Image (cartoon, grey):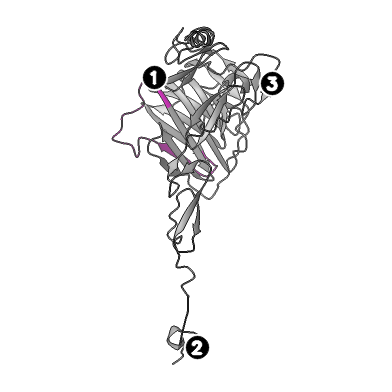
Amino acid sequence: MYQDPYSRSRVLKAVDTSECNDDSCSSMPCLNGACIVTDNQGYSCKCSASFSGRHCEIQLDPCASEPCSYGATCISLPESRFSCLCPSGSAGEYCELETSEGGDESGIVLDFKCDSYVEFPTLPNAAHSLRVEIWFMTRSLNGLLLYNGQKPNGVGDFLALTLLNGFLHFTYNLGSGTANIAHLEVLRSHQPIRLGAWHSVKISRLKNRGMLQVDNGEIVRGQSKGALSELNLGQPLYIGGVPEFLPLKYSLVVQVGLDGAVQRMVVNDEVWDDILSFSTGQRNIEHYIGPPCSPGICKNNGRCIPLLDDYKCQCVDGYTGKWCNKSEFYKKHKETFK
C-alpha cells in the first residue's frame, strides 16, 4: 500500500506551523473592504471609502465629505452615490467649473399627457450592460415609461419599461427570446404603484440577465431565453411615450404613453436632472406644477429641488434656512448687537 512520504504520520516535530488557509480572514468577515490578518491571528478590516465599522457594515453618507464646490447642494443617492446641484454660475460633476451664463434648470419636472414623449440618442454602451433609474409619478395605471428599439419598423432587439394595471414591467429582447420582469411576480403581497405618488424604479441588464427594483424594495430578477446575450439598439431612446408613426414591438401590451411626470433620470450612473438638455426632440411636454415643489414653497427667489416626495430649497446669496426665509444680513447684525 502506497504511503505519502510527506504525510503527517511521518512528521517527528513541528514548531510554529499552521494550515496555510487557516486564518481569520478565510470566513471573509469584511463585508465592504479588505481583510488583513494581524500578528495574533486576529484580523482587521480596511473599509472602502463609503463604509465604516469593524466589519465595514456601516454605509457612510456620500455627502459627508462635502464633495460639491461653490456652495452647491449635495444630494445623496442610493448605492453610496451623490449628485451635485450647481448654483448659477457653475457647472460640472462637482460644480467645479465657472460658467459665464446662469446654471442649469435642475428642479424643472416634466409633465406628460399620454401623447407626449421626449427623444434622446440611443442608450449608450448598452450592448452588454446598462443601468437606468427613473423618478416618476403617474396618474394612470397604464403607460409607457421607456422604450428603445433596434429598427424603425419595430423588428429586432428592444427594451421597454411599462406600467400595466399599476405594476411595472421591464421587458427586453436580445433576438432569441423576450424576458418580461414584473415586480408583481415576487412582490405579490405589496400594493401596486400608487397614483399621484412619487416612485423610483431601477432597471439593469448584464448580458441576458435583467433586474427590476421599485422604491428600493425587493429586487426581481429574470433572464431572456436563448444563447444570445448582446442588446443591439439603433433607434432613439424615448421617455414617456413614442411618436405616432413609430410601431412598437408587437409583444408590448401597453402602447399608450405616460400620464404623469418625471423628476429625474440616471443613465449608467450619470444623473440627468435637466432632462431636456440631453434630448434631441419632444412633443407636448409641459412643466409639472405640484408637490413636492408647490409654488412659493421656497422664499426669496430660492429654487425648489424635488427629491421624490421631499424637496430642498437652493437659496440665493444672502438667504439661508429650509425655506430660504432667513436673512444672513439680519443674522450678522443681530449677533453684532448682542
Mark 3 or mark 2, which has the lower sequence index? 2
Residue lying farthest to the front in this orientation: 338
Q: Which residues are magenta?
A: 173-199
- Indicate the amino acid at tag 3: Glu
Mark toward the start of the polypeptide (1 vs 2): 2
Q: Secondary structure at mark 2?
A: loop
Look at the picture and state if 125 lies above or below 310. below
Q: Which residue is labeled 2 in the image?
A: 5
Q: Position of residue 205 (x, y in %)?
A: 51, 41
Badge 1 density bin: few <14, some 14–19, many ≥20, Cα 10 Å: some
In the picture provided, is 277 more to the left or to the right than 173?
A: right
Secondary structure character of the magenta stretch overall: loop
Of circles 1 and 3, the one toward us is 3
Q: CA distance from mark 3 to mark 2?
A: 74 Å
Which residue appears farthest toward the right when viewing the image? 100
Q: Is residue 70 above or below residue 215?
A: above
Please name which of the two marks, 3 or 2, marks the residue nearer to the observer: 3
Q: How far apart, in angstroms, are the residues tagged by discs 1 and 3?
A: 42 Å
Q: Which residue is mark 3?
A: 98
Q: Residue at x 37, y 22 (%)?
A: 141
Q: Which mark is residue 168?
A: none
Question: SS for tag 3?
Answer: strand
User: The disc labelled 1 sits on which kind of residue?
Assistant: Ser
Circles 3 and 2, Cβ within 8 Å, touching? The answer is no
Residue 244 visible in the picture: no
Q: Position of residue 28 (x, y in %)?
A: 45, 57
Q: Would you say residue 107 is visible in this rendering? A: yes
Residue identified by numbered label 1: 140
The residue type indicated by label 2 comes to Pro
